[in-house]
């Protein structure tokens, strides 16, 4: 008989109860976790990777880690290799929402539990994963929208907005757009005049902002960027075009990484909505519970705030990512 982690745990408990073997006889076998990361596209992602690696080490979990370079096919390959290696648990942050059904079914057939972190997938059968832990991206978009509506309350409009979207097809890009539009859509003075992907990177954010400026110039009143890195790239483009970021163009972004706080303290970014990448500790505790056969909630939502530039200097020393 082949022992997987769950039957082994049961066998350990039984052997220990009957006094046949002390629990310590099994203590050496570490839990093996295969983690398929999105990439290293942003400051957020770097902090997320660091959180996962350090909390795995702290929890005594043997972590197998791969970087998909923002490509779904690489991520699917990595998951397949974790299945072949018979790891105890697979966790991943799906690059995009769709197209993972087949590989998730393969994991299920191999009886390997899957945890989704940070981004979710769209699947009909939600028994294909045990839990999804991460932020509510629609709510983040709403927070950005509410901040803008308040900021512009005395402005008769039109308020012309350009939008830098995240990776096409990714949950945060889809949901941050949706939440933002839900709020600003209530007042016709708000107009999204250009919207394009900057793939969550500084380089792309700068490049696309250059194109927006070329096409719309001084008509642009607001930039809404789906993450801080793209906003930071865009700030460069705005300065190079001879305009003042956060003054000539109001800038809103999401993540609240240290780079955003530095930009706010320099007076170049108006506000950043928080999205915490520090998912490592809760991932490790869920992995341990799953292996021990304990129930875990289907959805674990991260609690987050919003930081306008006025509070940046006071908050900066407290920031952990
Ligand atoms: O906002 C962005 C990163 O999925 C929440 O991915 C994450 C997003 C984050 O590249 O900076």
Image: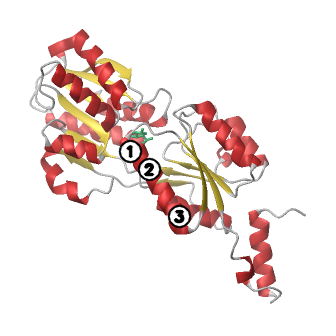
Residue 64 against residue 273 in the figure, above or below: below
Query: CA–CA distance between discs 2 and 1?
Result: 6 Å
Q: Secondary structure at mark 1?
A: helix
| Quadrant of res 315 | bottom left
* Position in image of residue 135 (x %, y %): 43, 48
| Quadrant of res 160 | top left
Residue 145 against residue 89 in the figure, above or below: above
Which callout, 3 or 1, points at the residue further toward the start of the chain? 1
Residues packed near mark 1 inside 10 Å, few (<14), some (14 to 19) or many (20 plus): many
* Position in image of residue 292 (x %, y %): 67, 69
Q: In this figure, which residue is indicated by the disc labeled 3?
A: 57
Q: In this figure, which residue is indicated by the disc labeled 1?
A: 44
- Whether disc 1's CB lies below 8 Å from ligand 1 is answered yes
Query: CA–CA distance between discs 3 and 1?
Result: 20 Å
Q: Residue at x 26, y 27 (%)?
A: 234
Residues packed near mark 3 inside 10 Å, few (<14), some (14 to 19) or many (20 plus): few
Tell me: 33 left or right of 142: right
Q: Residue at x 49, y 33 (%)?
A: 170
Q: In this figure, which residue is indicated by the disc labeled 2?
A: 48
Residue 51 against residue 109 in the figure, above or below: below
Which callout, 3 or 2, points at the residue further toward the start of the chain? 2
Query: CA–CA distance between discs 3 and 2?
Result: 14 Å
* Position in image of residue 251 (x %, y %): 21, 32
Q: Is residue 294 visible?
A: yes
Q: Nearer the viewer, mark 3 or mark 2?
A: 3
């Amino acid at each position: 008989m082949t022992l997987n982690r769950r039957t082994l745990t049961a066998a350990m408990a039984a052997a220990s109860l009957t006094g046949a073997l002390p629990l310590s006889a099994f203590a050496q076998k570490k839990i093996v976790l295969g983690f398929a990361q999105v990439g290293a596209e942003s400051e957020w992602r770097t902090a997320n990777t660091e959180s996962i690696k350090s909390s795995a080490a702290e929890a005594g979990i043997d972590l197998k880690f791969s970087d998909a370079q923002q490509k779904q096919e690489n991520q699917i390959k990595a998951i397949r290799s974790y299945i072949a290696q018979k790891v105890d648990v697979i966790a991943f942050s799906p690059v995009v929402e769709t197209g993972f059904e087949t590989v998730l079914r393969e994991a299920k057939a191999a009886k390997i539990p899957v945890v989704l972190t940070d981004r979710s997938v769209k699947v009909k059968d939600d028994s294909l994963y045990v839990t999804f832990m991460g932020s509510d991206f629609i709510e983040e978009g709403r927070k950005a929208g509410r901040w803008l509506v308040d900021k512009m309350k005395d402005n008769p409009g039109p308020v012309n907005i350009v939008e830098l979207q995240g990776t096409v097809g990714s949950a945060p890009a889809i949901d941050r757009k949706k939440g933002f539009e839900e709020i600003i859509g209530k007042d016709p003075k708000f107009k999204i005049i250009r919207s394009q992907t900057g793939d969550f990177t500084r380089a792309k954010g700068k490049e696309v902002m250059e194109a927006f400026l070329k096409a719309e110039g001084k008509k642009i009143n607001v930039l809404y960027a789906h993450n801080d890195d793209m906003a930071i790239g865009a700030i460069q483009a705005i300065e190079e075009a001879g305009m003042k970021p956060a003054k000539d163009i109001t800038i809103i972004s999401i993540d609240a990484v240290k780079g955003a706080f530095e930009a706010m303290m320099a007076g170049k970014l108006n506000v950043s909505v928080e999205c915490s990448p520090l998912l490592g500790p809760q991932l490790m505790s869920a992995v341990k519970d799953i292996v021990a056969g304990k129930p875990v909630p289907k959805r674990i939502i991260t609690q987050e705030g919003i930081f306008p530039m006025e509070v940046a200097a006071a908050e900066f020393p407290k920031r952990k990512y």
